[in-house]
Every structure is written in structure tokens, then in C-alpha cells.
Amino acid sequence: MAQQATPVRTARLARTLGPEPATVSGVVLLLPGGEEVSARRPAPVLAASSVRALGRRLARAGRGEGLAVHVVRYRYRGWNGSEAHLARDATWAVEEAVRRYGDVPVCLAGLDMGGRAALHAGGHEAVDSVVAIAPWLPEDDVAASPEPVKQLAGRRVLVVHGTNDGRTDPELSFRFAERAKKANRDVCRFEVHADGHGLHQYRSEVHALACDFVMGTLFGRPFSRPVQDALAAPPPLGLRMPLAAGFGKSLRW
């Protein structure tokens, strides 16, 4: 009996969140969280739920600018060591966005393990900016195999982390941002005091901050004063910028 070939897993872009623009002028690729090691397929609905609310807000904010927002559907749940499956899928997603939409700026926005994938894949020439929310980062052994930062040169990078995060260590994202700032001055990091991994207490503020950053990097809208200050301030000030309660209430989105 002939053996059936094992289907090849492929990453995918989910359909655009919100109405699809008639003309696309910028793309946000949303990278959900994952696991450190797993060969299982992600559950599409569950995986997308962690980033869908942010995606809808971004789609509303960029509707008049021609922004297309897609969730990336990974092949595997796990990062899986040197395979770095999530980062590879993020890079594939950028290539797919270029194939579909042409020469438009791309922002990678990731949560948890997706934040690490966004930072790794940020070196693609089409990527203009990176947003990493509560990124999962390994212990940063600089002497052995540090997380790469040189690929972020020329990109604008926003890291957001809750100070009470019990799943991903906020101090590791600070140390990563500190190293990245040496290679690229356009790096800022905001701390959400007393919030945990899901950033539930200040979700509206976090989403408003992400919108402010994405609209500024992709479409040239003026950054809010806190983002301007965070980008301009030297370490550690610009990397421990507190996210104020109520941030974004005066913004259009």
C-alpha cells in the first residue's frame, strides 16, 4: 500500500481585521504568543485572541491611512530552540506582505513569545518598526549566545512590559532594550506599574500607546509627548518610562 505523504505545514496570514483597504499603504503583522517548546499546531482562535483586540484598534486608527492588519498563524506553537519557528514564520509573513502589497512599510507587533519573534524578524528590509509587548526573552547570557540586537538598526522599536509580570521577566526586556539602544538610538521601553503579563488593568492605555507608535512610524503622524520623550531620553530613563493611567484619552483613536 502506498504511503501518504505527510502534509507540509505552512504559516498563513489571517484575513484583514476590519474592512480591507482599497489601497494599502502600510501593514501591521500581529504575532501571538507561543510556547518555548512544542511541535503542536496552534489553536487559531485561541492564539489570535491575545492580539485581536489590539489589531481591531489599530485597524480603526489606520483606516484612513490604508492600513492592513493581519494576525500571523504559525506552523507550530513552540519556538523550539535553534529552529526558532516563530521567528521564521514572522519573516515569512513579512515576505508575504511584500508579495501582496508591494513596497509598503511593515510593523511587526508581538505579544509574549510573539514579541521575541518580532524582535528577531525585525531585520527584514521591509520592516520599519517593531512593537514587543511583554516579550518572552531567555536569560541574556552575553558571553555565550545573547539575543541579537544588530538587526534592529534603522528600525524604531517599542517595548512595553508590566512590572508585576510573573510569566515573562520585565528585567530581561529592560536589559535587552539597553543593549539594543546601543546599536540603535530609536528604541524606547515603557513600564506599566503594578500590572501583570496580560496587562489587563491598563489594556486601553497599552493599546493607545501601540497605536500612537504605529501611526507615527508607518504614516508619519506626530508621536505623543511621552513617546517623543522616551525615544529622546538616554538610558535608563527612556527605557523605564512609566505608562500613565489614562494615556490616549485625548488621542483620536
Image (cartoon, grey):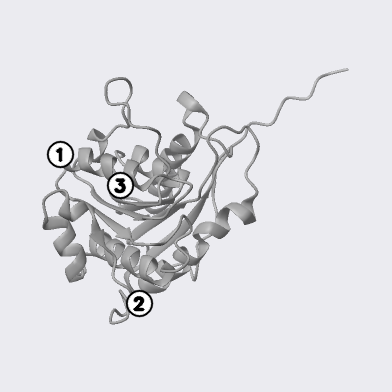
Mark number for residue 253? 2
Q: Position of residue 151 (x, y in %)?
A: 26, 36
Quarter occupied by residue 146: top left
Q: Position of residue 8 (x, y in %)?
A: 63, 31
Residue underneath mark 1: 182
In the image shown, does 197 or 145 lie closer to the viewer? 197
Q: Would you say residue 22 is visible in this rendering?
A: no
Q: Residue furthest right?
A: 1
Q: Please say if the residues under marks 1 and 2 sit with CB atoms less than 8 Å apart.
A: no
Task: Name the amino acid type tagged 3.
Answer: Val
Label whose residue precedes the other's in the sequence (3 or 1): 3
Q: Nearer the viewer, mark 1 or mark 2?
A: 1
For mark 3, does the 10 Å Cα neighbourhood hold few (<14), some (14 to 19), or many (20 or more) residues?
Answer: many
Q: Locate residue 51 relative to residue 115 in the image: left or right.
A: right
Q: Position of residue 6 (x, y in %)?
A: 71, 27
Residue underneath mark 3: 127
